[in-house]
Image: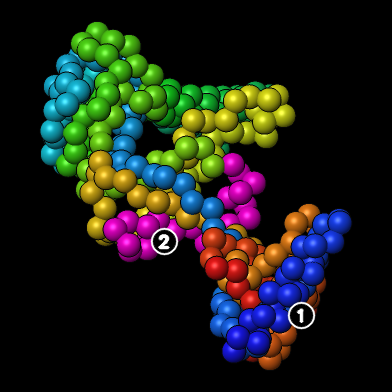
Amino acid sequence: MKKIVGVCMAAVLLLSGCGETKTLKAPELIQPVGVDMDTAEVIKMDLSGVTAFSAQIVPSVEELSFLSSGSIGSLNVSVGDKVKKGQLLATLSVSSAKIKDLRNEIKTLKAQNEDRNKQGQYDIEMLEENIKELRKQLSKEKESSRIKRIKKQIESAKMDVKIAEEKLQQQKELQQLEIRQKERELTEKQKSTKGAKLYSPINGEVIGTAGGSGYMVQGGDTAIQVANMERPRLKTAYVSSSLIAKANRCIAVIDGKEYEIEIEEQQMSREEIERGSAPPENSWFDFKEDHVLAEVGNSAAVELHTDSVKDALVVPVNALLGSGEEKYVYLVEGDAKIKTVVTVGTQTDAYVQLVTGVKEGDVVYVES
C-alpha cells in the first residue's frame, strides 16, 4: 500500500515540477447504460385544439314591445321590480270611442245602402212593368204606324232597364268597397287596442323601461326589458366570427360539467367590418339544453374546439423539441435516443399531434 501511494506522489511531483502548466481536456461524458429517463408511448386519440374564454352566467333578457305606436298611458312597473308571467306591465293611451264610432258608421252605411239598393231594384221593376204594358198594347194594336212606335218604346224601355241594372251593380260594388275600407279601419283599431297592453311573458325582473306615462313609443320598439332568471346564458369578451367559423364544438364548463352551447348571431355586418367599425364588446352564448345547473351571477368557461382530428397520433407536448420550422422528437430504442424530425398537427396544452415521423407504439423521450 505504501509503495502505491509513493508512486502516485511521484507522478504528482513530476507534473508539478515542469516549468509550464498544461490544461488537461476533460473527457466527454457518456450517458451510463441503464440510467432511467422519462419516456412516453405514441398513442392514438381524438384531439382538438381548444381556445378558452372566461364567461359570466347572466339571465336571458326578454325585450317587450307594443304592437302599435302611441304614448304610454300607464307604466305599472319600475326597474328592479319582480314580475310574474301574465302580469300587466304597461298600457298605451288608445281611445275606444273611435272603435265604437266606426262600428256605428258601418252599421249606418249598410242600412243606407240597403235602402238605396231597394229603391234601385224597385225602379228596375217599374221599368219592366212598363215594358209589359207596352207589349199588351202592341198585341192589341192594328195600325202599323202605332205598332212601329210602340216597338220603339219597348226597345227604349229595355235599354233603360239594362242601364238601371248596370247602375245598380256599380252602386253595390262601390258600397262594398266603402264598407271593406271601414271594416279594415275597424280591424286596425281593434288590433291597436289589443296591442296597447303589454304583459310579461315570463317570471322575471324588470331591468329597463323606455319611459314613463306620456312617453311616445313606436310599435315593435323595445319598451320594457325583463330578465329571465330561470333561463341563464353566457357572456364573454367578443369572440371573432372567424374563430367561431372554425369551431367544431362549442361547450361551457361549469363546476367541472360540460354543456353544449351555441353563439348568438354576431351583430356586425360585412359592411361594418369593411368600414372598420369596432366589434361589439361582448359575445353571447345560449345553452342547447333546457335545464342546466348554472346559477346567474356565477362564472364559467367557454371552450371552442377547433381542428378536431379522429385517431390522431399524439405525444405529450414536452416530447416535442425544436424551434422555428424544424420540430423533432427523440425516439428511444434501447439505450439510444434517435433524433427524428416530425410534422406537427393539432396541439393542445397537454398533447400534440405528430402527422409524420412516428408510428403508434413508438417510445419517445420526454423532457421533465
Q: Is residue 22 visible to us here?
A: no
Task: Tell whether 241 sits left or right of 82.
Answer: right
Q: Is residue 351 magenta?
A: no
Q: Residue at x 54, y 42 (%)?
A: 239
- Neighbor class of circle 1 (other Cα within 10 Å; few <14, some 14-19, many 20+) is some
Rendered location of residue 180, percent (x, y): 41, 29
Cα distance in 3D space between marks 2 and 1: 43 Å
Residue lying at 34% horizontally and 42% vertically, measured from the top left: 56
Frontmost residue, 209 versus 357: 357
Q: Which residue is mark 2?
A: 260
Q: Give the residues drawn in magenta, as a range.
A: 240-260
Q: From this view, report whether residue 161 is shown above or below residue 41.
A: above
**At which x and y percent is residue 130?**
47, 27
Badge nearest the viewer, 2 or 1? 1
Q: x, y percentage for residue 90? A: 20, 23
Q: Is residue 299 left or right of residue 42?
A: left
Name the one closer to the observer, 128 or 304. Answer: 304
Q: Earlier in the sequence, mark 2 or mark 1?
A: 2
Secondary structure at numbered mark 1: strand
Quadrant of image for the N terminus? bottom right
Picture quarter containing residue 258? bottom left
Q: Is residue 252 magenta?
A: yes
Q: Which residue is mark 1?
A: 338
Q: Residue at x 54, y 35 (%)?
A: 267
- Residue 78 x/y as whole percent: 17, 21
